[in-house]
Amino acid sequence: MKRNILNIHSKILYIFFLFLSLNIFFFSTVKCNAKAFDIDNIDISQPFEMNFNKNEVIDEGFKKAYQNLIKLILNSEDQKRIKKIKLNEIKGMIESFSIKEEQFINEIYYVKLGVSFNRKKIFNFLERNNIFPSNPQKKKVLFIPVIIDEEKKQLLIFSNNKIFEIWNNDIKDFHLIEYILPTEDLEDINLIKDKFEIIEGYDFKEIISKYNLQDSIISLIFTGKNEARVLSKMNIQNNITIKNQTFLDLDINNEVQITEMIDQLKIIYEDYWKISNQINTSIKLPLSIKVSNNDNLKISNFEKKMTDIELIYDFFIKKFDKDFTYYQIIFNGTPDIFLKTMNENNYKFDTQNNIWLLK
């Protein structure tokens, strides 16, 4: 009888410790999944007729979500390479979707979708096509467009500057750059006009310094007879790049033509930002890291940060003991870039041993 009681107690203790171990494992790995790409506000509509099929509408939403995703993470040239793709391939990369809103108005079915794409599957698909995605980081940029009428020897800065007036009229969800336009300032107007003869070499520092922004794009639009030459000075993350574009058969007073030019310029600027943030997914660096079990909040915050960092391809728990939780991290970059990225997020490591310790 006594032996039976001991056996029962042993089983109870075994079950308790097994449950405790599983509880620690499952609850500590809830967020050990690569971040999904969430594409929201996908609006689709279709007439509600006899052959109406809701699944077909949803499928159109998947196609549109895919197009929005590649516009978000790929430069314009790479977008063209994988624009045509079978629906089944798109569906295979979708992690989940949700119907945010649906309604019938005047016999037309309207639906708004949210679609989550599996990040690893998207990266693997792009890698098979020899395409590197970009880290979809938002960026605020001071944007100063100046029209130079070379015939009239005239500068248009704020007033009568159609580009300044309508630049932010059409903002897309997949645009990464947020353009901050300067406020009308008489002192700035006079300063720029005084630089007319050397406008191409002027750095605009006196004006840029008034704004709490590190990055800027100065767009000088030289107009002639039915054409415009645009000189763009992009100062992004302390890297200065100059680009020249020529737009033929352009009437600077025609809003439709100006809108088309603005769209093309935004593509150029978005491409520049994306290329500077490309992720080399062909590099898959395995890193072993251990974190002390003394602070559950620290573990939770660390896992959340791992999920948020785009350069982390994947991570998972290899094992754990009473002192540490051991992680395997797959990183799209070098060890130095990993340490720099983590340092920027206030995480430091002891790298003396093969398994790095989170301090």
Image (spheres, rainbow, N blue to C red):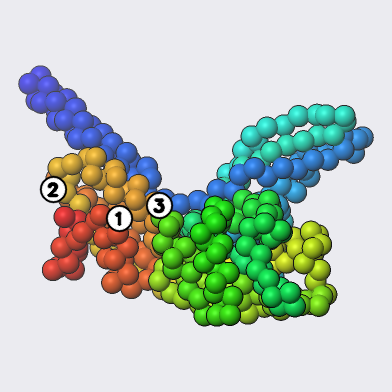
In the image, what residue occupies the spot 55% across and 57% down?
186
- Against 216, is 104 above or below? above
According to the image, label 2 marks what residue? 323
Disc number lying in front (3 or 2): 3
Quadrant of the image containing the C terminus: bottom left
User: Which quadrant holds residue 205?
Assistant: bottom left
- 1 or 60, nearer to the observer: 60
According to the image, label 3 marks what residue? 308
Across and down, in percent, residue 356 comes to 19, 63
- 82 or 196, nearer to the observer: 196
Disc number lying in front (1 or 3): 1
Which residue type carries mark 2? Asp
Across and down, in percent, residue 177 comes to 55, 58
- 179 or 116, nearer to the observer: 179
According to the image, label 1 marks what residue? 345
| SS for dot 1 | loop
**Distance of label 3 from label 2 (alpha carbons):** 26 Å
Q: Would you say residue 261 is visible in this rendering? A: yes
Disc on the earlier residue, 1 or 3 = 3
